[in-house]
């Protein structure tokens, strides 16, 4: 997606050392072999993987990118001596190295905005990091320092904003993620897949593996016509537990697994699909979990089947845009009814979605809100 960045945007790249090469050696992975999603904090781990997670949580504070801090600060200080900066936006501020680098700017009295695309101590895998009491307290102390020092704090969901309020006594502004409307100009124009395709785009890790969904599909596949028409399209990396569930439910031969694709090709697959699958992480911070792909799904204007908390922020967005239906994590019967109703519409070539108010999630509009906040703190 680098091609989408304007040529007038100056980019400074700072080389760093990352410990993932060492981690791969410890768990027996080849240098160029990709890690399967969910392995860093999964429930089934080898002794070496458990040790690595402990090291990551307790020694790499706040995370394995800590080795970026010194070289980034060095480059940033040099740049600030040579250029005038009005304000800075620390993107993905859910990490102390972002705050540490921003301190260089703070020392020069340059205002900065901390943009939390993810939580910090409320991140979905935080409880799996095997933290000691000392490490847990340090994480929370650094997090509070960041929240107190930033001139403005932004986050992406209303529930997470409430979490930050409880932590710091200050509530951030909510500016959600979004989608680029120019990517979806053909939405509703492309020919749909002939099969009853259910597509998921992105990593399908352990926490997102929708057990109830596979079970609902398996029961519906007792109907020969449904089984014949069904195709499950998973784009991206898939955790072994999901493959195991598909096998157990007799659905493996209905799977079309697609390796990582360029973004424009993924968008095309979404717009052609009959249904879009959105399983959420069944984790402690579920209320505020709103995957970035939800907005891409909304842009594709195909019906969304979401598995998650029916009162969470993702559910509110889907309901507010009339872009799909939500079922609970274990609600097999509701999933079966939802899928059956969509399948019946598919058979009559009437499976469409009349979504509304989706323009509010345009990235151009959302970027304008970030710009407005930067203008406020820099004046």
Image (tube, rainbow, N blue to C red):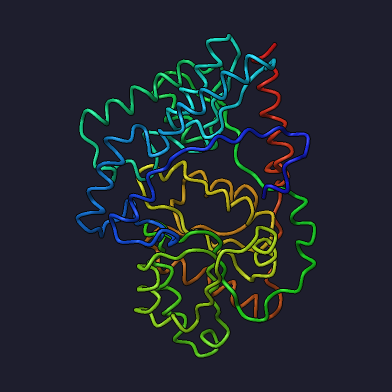
Image quadrant for the C terminus? top right
Looking at the rendering, which quadrant does residue 268 occupy? bottom right
Q: What x and y, as percent, mark residue 211?
A: 37, 66
Report which quarter residue 141 is drawn in: top left
Is the residue 65 above or below the residue 197 in the image? Answer: above
Which quadrant would residue 304 be assigned to in this image? bottom right
Q: Say whether residue 206 is left or right of residue 178.
A: left
Query: Which residue in the rendered view is the most extreme toward the bottom?
Result: 224
Q: Residue at x 34, y 49 (%)?
A: 22
x, y percentage for residue 201?
56, 62
Relative to 89, residue 239 above or below: below
Image point (52%, 28%), residue name: 72
Residue closer to the observer: 155 or 333: 155
Residue 48 vs residue 352, the one in the foreground: 48
Q: Compare residues 244 and 225 and report the one nearer the observer.
A: 244
**Residue 234 position in % (x across, y down):** 52, 69
The x, y position of residue 207, in whole percent, is: 38, 56
Above or below 250: residue 135: above
Q: How many marks?
A: 0
Q: Is residue 137 left or right of residue 333?
A: left
Left or right: residue 69 compared with residue 264: left
């Amino acid at each position: 997606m680098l091609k989408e960045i304007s040529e007038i945007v100056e980019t400074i790249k700072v080389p760093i050392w990352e410990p993932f090469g060492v981690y791969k050696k410890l768990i027996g992975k080849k240098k160029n072999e990709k890690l399967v999603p969910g392995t860093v904090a999964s429930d089934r781990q080898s002794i070496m993987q458990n040790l690595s997670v402990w090291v990551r949580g307790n020694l790499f504070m706040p995370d394995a990118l800590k080795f970026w801090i010194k070289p980034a600060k060095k480059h940033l200080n040099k740049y600030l001596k040579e250029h005038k900066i009005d304000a800075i936006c620390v993107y993905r501020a859910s990490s102390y190295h972002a705050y540490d680098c921003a301190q260089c700017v703070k020392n020069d009295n340059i205002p900065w905005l901390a943009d939390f695309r993810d939580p910090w101590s409320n991140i979905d895998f935080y409880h799996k990091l095997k933290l000691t009491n000392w490490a847990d307290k340090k994480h929370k102390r650094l997090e509070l320092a960041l929240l107190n020092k930033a001139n403005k704090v932004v986050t992406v969901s209303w529930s997470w904003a409430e979490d930050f309020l409880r932590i710091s006594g200050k509530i951030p502004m909510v500016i959600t993620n979004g989608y680029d409307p120019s990517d979806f100009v053909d939405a509703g124009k492309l020919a749909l897949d002939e099969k009853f395709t259910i597509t998921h785009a992105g990593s399908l890790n352990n926490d997102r593996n929708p057990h109830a969904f596979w079970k609902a599909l398996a029961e519906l596949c007792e109907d020969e016509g449904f089984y014949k028409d069904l195709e499950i399209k998973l784009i991206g990396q898939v955790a072994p537990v999901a493959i195991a569930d598909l096998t157990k439910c007799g659905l493996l031969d209905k799977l079309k697994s697609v390796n990582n694709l360029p973004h424009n090709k993924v968008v095309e697959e979404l717009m052609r699909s009959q249904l879009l699958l959105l399983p959420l992480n069944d984790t402690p911070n579920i209320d505020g979990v709103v995957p970035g792909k939800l907005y891409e799904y909304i842009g594709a204007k195909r019906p969304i089947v979401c598995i998650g908390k029916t009162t969470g922020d993702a559910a509110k967005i889907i309901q507010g845009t009339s872009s799909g239906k939500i079922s609970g994590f274990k609600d097999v019967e509701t999933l079966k009814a939802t899928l059956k109703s969509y399948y019946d519409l598919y058979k009559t070539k009437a499976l469409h979605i009349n979504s509304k108010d989706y323009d509010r999630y345009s990235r151009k509009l959302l970027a304008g809100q970030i710009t407005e906040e930067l203008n406020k703190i820099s004046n």
